[in-house]
Image (cartoon, coloured by chain):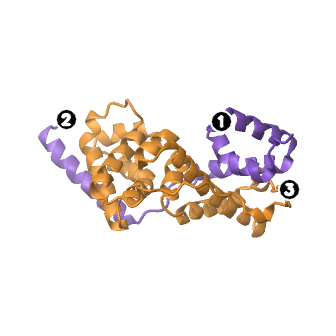
Chain colours: A orange, B purple
Amino acid sequence: MEDEALLERILGGDHDAFRDLVERYQMSLVRLARYYVKSEASAEDVAQDTWIAVMQGLERFEGRSSFKTWLFRIAANRARKTGTREYRVVTVDPVDPVSSARFNEGGMWNEAPVPFTELINDKLANAGVLEACRNAIRDLPEPQQSVVTLRDVEGLSTREVSDLLELSEANTRVLLHRGRAKIRETLEETLTGGRSWQ
Amino acid sequence: MTRDITCHQAVALVSDYLEGALARRDRRRLERHLADCGACSAYLDQMRATIALSGSVGPEDLSNEAVARLVDVFEKYHRENSGESPN
C-alpha cells in the first residue's frame, strides 16, 4: 500500500496502518539519526520523537513534498538539535572502487567481471543475494551507510540526501560511490565465490 | 587516442555516470570506452544491479518491542486527540 493510502487510514486512527508505516521507515530513520547522534539509543529516541511529530503534524501535512521527504526532514531537524555532529569534516578523496590487483599494468581487467543479471537467475538465489546486500549496507561505516540508505534504499535524490546530511552534492556522490563499491564487491563474492546458488 | 581511458579509470567513473553527474567530456570518454569494452560493460551491469538490489532490500526486521512501544504511543495520542474532537 502506498504511503498516502496509509496516511488516510492513520488519520482515522488505524493503528495497523501506523505499524506498517513504522516498519517501513524506522530502520532508515534510525540510520539518519545515527549520522548526527552519538549512540544507537539516542538515535532511537530521535526516531520516536519523529513519529510523535508526524502524528501531531499529519493533519497539516499538505503533500507538497512526498511524505517520505517530509518524514526524513523532520528526523534530520530533530537529530541535529539532539546530536553532536561527528561527521562535520568528511574526507572525500576518491578511492578505487575495484582493487588495483584486478587490473594489469596497462589498466585492463585481468579477468573480466560477470554481469550480475546473468548470475541472479532464480528466486532462491535472489533471497540469498538480497540478504547479502542488506548485510553489506548494514556493515558500511557512517557516513556511507546513511548516504546509501537514503539514496539507494529509499530512493531520495542526491540533492535531498545532501540537504538532509548537510553535505555538498559532490561529497555525497563520493560517499555513495564508496558505499556502492563495497556492496558490489560483497555481491560479487556472494555470486561468484560462494557457489551455493548453483 | 591518448585521451582514451583504461578500464581501471573507467570503473572509477561509473557511479557518477549513473548519477548523471559526469562532465560531458568524461561522459563521452566513458561511453566510448564502454562501447568497445565488454568487461567494463559487465561492470556497469554489476553496478546497476547493485543499486537495484539496494532499492529492493526492504526494511530489516524490527524488534516487536520497539514497534509495540510506538504503536502504544500512537494509540494514546489518537485516544486523547479524538476525545477532544469526536467524529
Asked if residue A113 lies left or right of residue A6, the reply is right
Mark linked to residue B87: 2
Chain bearing mark 1: B
Chain bearing mark 3: A
Residue A136 in sight from this viewpoint? yes
- Name the amino acid, label 3: Gly
Q: CA distance from mark 2 to mark 1?
A: 57 Å
Mark linked to residue A32: none
Q: Secondary structure at mark 3?
A: loop
Q: Quadrant of the C terminus of chain B?
A: top left
How busy is the neighbourhood of tag 2: few (under 14 within 10 Å), some, or many (20 plus)? Answer: few
**On the image, numbered disc 1 is attached to which residue?**
B23
Of the two numbered discs 2 and 1 on the same chain, state the one appearing first in sequence: 1
Marks 2/1 in contact by CB < 8 Å: the verdict is no
Residue in the picture at 37% in, 56% down: A33
Q: Nearer the viewer, residue A158 or B81?
A: A158
